[in-house]
Image (cartoon, rainbow, N blue to C red):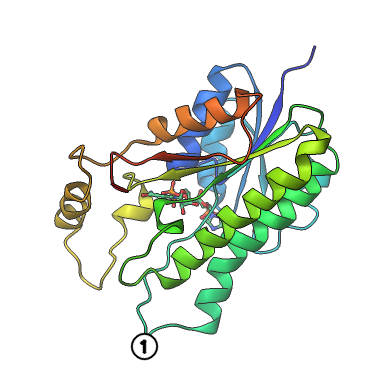
Amino acid sequence: MSPAHVLVTGGATGIGLGITRLLLNKGMRVSVCSRRPEPLSAVEALGAETLTWDLVQPLGLIHKLTPLTHLVHCAGNDNNDAIGSWSMSGFQETMALHALATAMLMQEWAAQAPTGGCFVGVASTLGRRTAPGKAAYSAAKAAMLSICQSGALELAPKRLRVNAVLPGVVETEMTRAPRTPGADIGQQLTELAELHPLGRLGTPSEVAEAVAYLLEAQWTTGAELVVDGGLSL
Ligand SMILES: NC(=O)c1ccc[n+]([C@@H]2O[C@H](COP(=O)([O-])OP(=O)(O)OC[C@H]3O[C@@H](n4cnc5c(N)ncnc54)[C@H](OP(=O)(O)O)[C@@H]3O)[C@@H](O)[C@H]2O)c1
């Protein structure tokens, strides 16, 4: 029997790279899509198949990858615009990547996925609450969670599953980028770590373990698995 084929969007860096590595180690066929060539080449060297794709326009991607068993939608951008700096383009890009792409990718994946297939959305604890500067990001992740719930319900009769993971703060390119102009990155990361009762940031591999669990858990659908060092408490 051929191995399960999984698409990891944004699977060449950060949390996505952790997911790609773990799923390759588990013997799955892994495809990765994102925009920049260098990270894609590096992940190809690990054994993944790659495709250059801008997920602001997700339609048609799945047709290039069928048959696809599972889909992990991890690609996303950050948005730290506080009120006064909100823009149509900023909201549109963030909503497109996290919310609209979730819906359109899920629809195209479900049209061809085999029984037992699973969609996992990499959401965030910020999909359930917010923080200063996080209006667009929190709204987009909340929409992603809601779309995953709808998908779980509507696809259950086809024996397809839809789940989400909600990471706390994980050290990646995204969290190392300055959140305010001129921010001291070391201090920014220390302050973010201190928000977590377990006293540190998460790692991509810790989120990857949660994703791998959801892909394999045949009686689990509609789950929102929080992996956040206690941040939500
Ligand atoms: N780090 C955290 O603390 C944290 C916490 C909770 C949730 N998350 C979520 O985890 C996911 C991964 O984030 P990360 O922290 O690992 O950051 P990251 O390393 O910056 O990963 C983001 C990935 O998304 C891809 N991407 C961005 N815009 C894209 C576009 N328009 N089309 C296609 N691909 C695009 C990027 O690749 P290219 O730029 O090459 O396209 C990159 O590989 C995101 O959805 C994020 O919201 C992160």
**Dividing the picture into quarters, in which one does residue 101 lie?**
bottom right
Is residue 217 found left or right of 109 in the rendered image? left
Is residue 208 found left or right of 59 in the rendered image? left
| Residue 38 rendering spot, x and y as whole percentages | 51, 45
Q: Residue at point 52% right, 60% down?
A: 142
Q: Which residue is most to the top?
A: 1
The amino acid beneath tag 1 is: Gly
Q: Which residue is most to the bottom?
A: 84
Q: Is residue 53 visible in the rendered structure shown here?
A: no
Q: Residue at point 34% right, 44% down?
A: 170
Relative to 2, is 155 above or below? below
Q: Residue at point 48% right, 60% down?
A: 77
| Residue 71 rendering spot, x and y as whole percentages | 67, 39
Q: Residue at point 40% right, 51% down?
A: 125
Q: Is mark 1 within 8 Å of ligand 1?
A: no
| Residue 162 rendering spot, x and y as whole percentages | 66, 40
Q: Which residue is mark 1?
A: 84
Q: Is residue 70 visible in the rendered structure shown here?
A: yes
Relative to 43, is 107 above or below? below
**Dividing the picture into quarters, in which one does residue 157 lie?**
top right
| Residue 86 rendering spot, x and y as whole percentages | 43, 82
Give the position of the N terminus as an image quadrant. Answer: top right
Query: What is the secondary structure assignment of the residue under circle 1?
Result: loop
Is residue 229 found left or right of 145 in the rendered image? left
